[in-house]
Structures are given as structure tokens and as C-alpha cells.
Amino acid sequence: MRGEPGLADAAQLFKVLGNESRLWLLRLVGEQPRTVGALAEITGMSQPLVSQHLRALRQSGLVAATRSGKEVTYELADVHVSHVIADALAHVLEPAAAHEVADSSQKEQRT
């Protein structure tokens, strides 16, 4: 099957992003660079699980790692990553906000 260039890579990116824990980790390292230990503490996930998710994110080119002694600090590899996540969140939250506005308008009309 031949499609538009980049579609297969984009599909693979969405597979990696299709995990709530990975999205959360990306949001956190998007706020500021963080170590595995800090991410485990914030999320409540075990350090091995955080490391496993970060490995997948690193292999996909979504995060970059900087080693300082024994500590590895992770940050977003590209600002586009934060835009993709922000747009996805805006998309899923938008219908809920629109539904709330419609509900409140209907209630006002009844009174």
C-alpha cells in the first residue's frame, strides 16, 4: 500500500502517543527537564516502568536524554511534540465544553 510520504511514520508516532502514561510523562518533561526519579515520584509509577516508557519515547525521537553522572535528565526533543499533545487535549476537551455551554443555555431558556 502506498500512501502519502510520512503517513507510516506518523501512524507509528500515534501508536507511541497512544498510551496515557507516556502522554503524562511528555507533559511533565515539557514543563521542565526531569530525571527518572522525579518522574516516578510525581506520577507514582515505579522507576522501572518510567524508564521503560522513556525508552520508548526516546527511541521514537520524542524525548532527549542528558547524562550527568548517574542521573539522566529527560526533556522534549522537539517543541512540536508539545503542540501535538496540546492539540489532542484541546480536541477531546472541546466537545465537553461546547456541551456544557449548550446545557446551560437550555436551562436559562426554561427559566
Image (cartoon, rainbow, N blue to C red):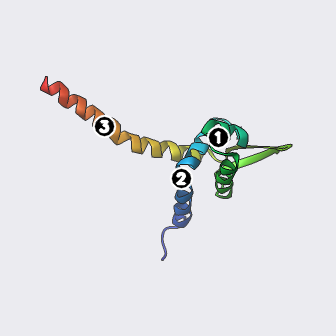
Lower position in the chain sequence, tag 1 or tag 3: 1
Image quadrant where residue 82 sits: top right
Residue at the right extreme of this rendering: 69
| Residue at the image position 64 percent from the left and 47 percent from the top | 78
3D distance between C-alphas at marks 1 and 3: 30 Å
Give the labeled residue for mark 1.
29
Q: Nearer the viewer, residue 68 or 38?
A: 38
Give the labeled residue for mark 3.
98
Residue at the left extreme of this rendering: 110
Residue 5: image x %, image y %? 53, 67
Lower position in the chain sequence, tag 2 or tag 3: 2
The mark found on residue 77 in the picture is none
Give the labeled residue for mark 2.
19
Image quadrant where residue 55 sits: bottom right
- Say what secondary structure mark 1 lies in: helix
For marks 2 and 3, give the one nearer the viewer. 2
Q: Nearer the viewer, residue 36 or 58?
A: 36
